Amino acid sequence: MDLMSVFIGVPTLVSGSAMLFFPRKKRLEAEAKVAIRKAQLAAGASERYFEEGRTLHAYPLPASDGKWRTRGAFLTACGIALLCLAYFR
């Protein structure tokens, strides 16, 4: 059994399943975190990395649940594949 595939496959499967079955909740959580961080930066907080504020404005989160579901399905499939590889190795 390949333990590296298990250690990567389990979190990938769990996070992908959450995105697949609860996309609205995950999207709203991410939007809330981005809004809080934008407000902190507007209030004068220092950036955690180079051009964080520009990045938050230039690359918005997906607006629909369909994109979150697609990503969740991809991560779930990858997690299952990694666990199968770990089992059959």
Image (cartoon, rainbow, N blue to C red):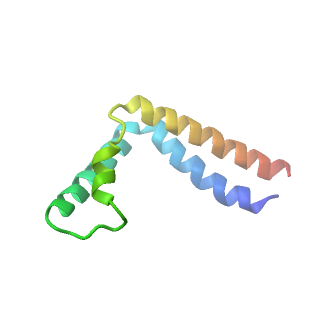
Residue sitting at x 80%, y 50%: 87
Left or right: residue 66 compared with residue 42: right
Residue sitting at x 72%, y 49%: 83
Left or right: residue 89 compared with residue 15: right
Q: Residue furthest bottom?
A: 46
Left or right: residue 33 compared with residue 6: left
Residue sitting at x 72%, y 56%: 5
> Foreground residue, 73 or 37?
37
> Foreground residue, 10 or 45?
45
Q: Quadrant of the N terminus?
A: bottom right
The x and y percentages for residue 76 are 59, 41
- Above or below, 39 against 78 in this view is below
The x and y percentages for residue 47 are 29, 67
The x and y percentages for residue 70 are 50, 32
The x and y percentages for residue 72 are 51, 39
Report the number of discs. 0
> Foreground residue, 50 or 56?
50
Q: In which quarter of the image is residue 52?
A: bottom left
Q: Quadrant of residue 66?
A: top left
Q: Which residue lies furthest to the left in this view?
A: 43
Residue sitting at x 17%, y 58%: 39
